Image: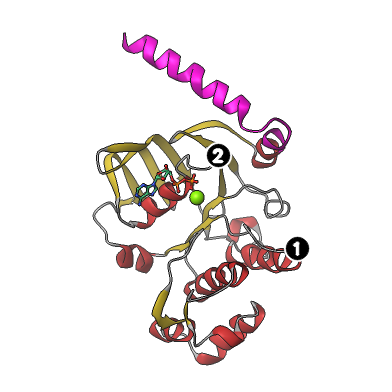
Amino acid sequence: MTEMPLLEIDDLAVNIGNEPLLSGINLTVAPGEIHVVFGPNGSGKSSLIKTIMGIPPYRVTSGDIRFEGKSILDFPIDARARLGIGLAFQQPPPVRDVSLSALGKALEIDTDRIAAEAARLGMTGHLNRGLNDGFSGGEQKRSELLQLLLQRPQLVLLDEPESGVDVDSLKLLRSVIEQLFQRDRPIRERTVGGIIVTHTGAILEHLHATRGYVLVNGKFMCSGAPLDIFDQISANGFGNCLAEARIKEKIHDFLKE
Ligand SMILES: Nc1ncnc2c1ncn2[C@@H]1O[C@H](COP(=O)(O)OP(=O)(O)O)[C@@H](O)[C@H]1O
Ligand SMILES: [Mg+2]
């Protein structure tokens, strides 16, 4: 029996205004799968994640994004969230008028659960502050994961969840990420899948992620086993992938002529 994929990205191209940003992106995420996106700064990783969530100003110029078989391109952000898509931002925007507890209540989550999840993430003292209003880097990361724990999305999008986090917090974040992806359940019973953007191997160690990709200049290059790709990048930087990208572009240009 083939299972319906959670997410299908089909030959996607994205612009900001008239500037091309992403092109030829293909990615399928089935329940239980975690796909990992690596890549140099500015290659378009956050833009890809935000495009899936429907956040402006990213404009899809061709291709499709489907959630459980249905195109979501015309769906606004809140509709995508209601479908079960959740995003932890790399740099979450401050929202001064909304607190974490207000957000939890809006999601109709009982206060005991909000309190318990907040305690687990060390956010008890921050529940009534404006969201990300003066949160430290670590607090922002924990707040983002807390929101996902409350939302329980089926498609989890994590944009550099570990960046700027100290070693002790990293352990905590890892266990929360494992929980979000139902790593405590047998593989066949997992219903959640997602994408993680990362620069470090630390959160990948126990996740058994499915596949990794290197995004270079808005295109996927060098896909493979996530930890192999991570090792390759750690040893050689992005140089090999950049070289591969240049060769592919030359072949592309040659075929066009
Ligand atoms: N809202 C925006 N307006 C203008 N340019 C943007 C916007 N978002 C991203 N970009 C540009 O798109 C490129 C990719 O950015 P980003 O997706 O954040 O890269 P990454 O996450 O891989 O570091 C960068 O050159 C960035 O400046
Ligand atoms: Mg980014």
Question: Which residue lies at the image location 38% right of the left edge and 83% below the top edge?
Answer: 106
Where residue 158 sits: x, y (%)?
Answer: 53, 57
The type of residue carrying mark 1 is Val
**Residue 167's disc number:** 1
Question: Which residue lies at the image location 44% right of the left edge and 51% below the top edge?
Answer: 49
How packed is label 2: few (under 14 Cα within 10 Å), some, or many (20 or more)?
some
Residue under label 2:
40
Question: Which residue lies at the image location 76% right of the left edge and 67% below the top edge?
Answer: 168
Ligand 1 contact, mark 2 (Cβ < 8 Å): yes
Pick whichever, 104 or 165, lies toward us. Answer: 165
First to last magenta residue range: 231-257
Spatial CA distance of label 1 from label 2 is 23 Å
Pick whichever, 243 or 27, lies toward us. Answer: 243
How packed is label 1: few (under 14 Cα within 10 Å), some, or many (20 or more)?
few
Residue 82, can we see it? yes
Pick whichever, 176 or 182, lies toward us. Answer: 176
Secondary structure of the residue carrying numbered label 1: helix
The type of residue carrying mark 2 is Pro
Query: Up-down: is 80 above or below 35?
Result: below
Where residue 215 sits: x, y (%)?
Answer: 51, 37
**Residue 57's disc number:** none
Q: How is the image coloured?
A: secondary structure
